[in-house]
Amino acid sequence: MSNRLEKIRLRLVTFNPTAFELTDDSHKHAGHAGSASGGGHYVLRIASAQFIGKNTIARHRMVYLALGDMMKQDIHALTIQALTPNEI
């Protein structure tokens, strides 16, 4: 696992996920402006009880907040599927 993937995983462990899949799709975006600046393209599927009672936007905001400064440089694009354990 790349260092960046591990860094993302470590930041999201605070959600105590019951399911977690993180894929690096950066190779599909070679030559894209975001790739040129060093930011990666990722797909995240995460399930957590912390998402219960929250709508999609609130769940995404929680993920962005947990990733913090990584969203400014390390991550150019992030596709998020944030679920509750019952939604898996």
Image (cartoon, rainbow, N blue to C red):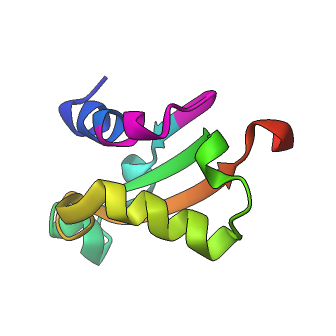
50 vs 38, nearest the viewer? 50
Q: Where is residue 9 in the image (x, y as percent from the top left)?
A: 36, 34
Whether residue 80 sits left or right of residue 87 in the image: it is left
The answer to whether residue 33 is visible is yes
20 vs 70: above or below = above
Which residue shows up at 27% across the image and 72% down it?
34
Q: Position of residue 67 (x, y in %)?
A: 30, 56
Q: Where is residue 5 in the image (x, y as percent from the top left)?
A: 31, 36
- Magenta-colored stretch includes residue 64: no
2 vs 69, nearest the viewer? 69
The residue stretch that appears in magenta: 11-21
Quarter-of-image position of residue 71: bottom left
- Magenta-colored stretch includes residue 14: yes
71 vs 19: above or below = below
86 vs 31: above or below = above
Which residue shows up at 63% across the image and 27% down it?
18
Q: Quadrant of the C terminus?
A: top right
Q: Where is residue 55 in the image (x, y as percent from the top left)?
A: 71, 70
Whether residue 67 sits left or right of residue 49 in the image: it is left
The answer to whether residue 40 is visible is no
Q: Quadrant of the N terminus?
A: top left
Whether residue 65 sits left or right of residue 55 in the image: it is left
17 vs 42: above or below = above
Which residue shows up at 52% across the image and 50% down it?
43
Which residue shows up at 62% across the image and 40% down it?
48
84 vs 74, nearest the viewer? 84
Quarter-of-image position of residue 77: bottom left
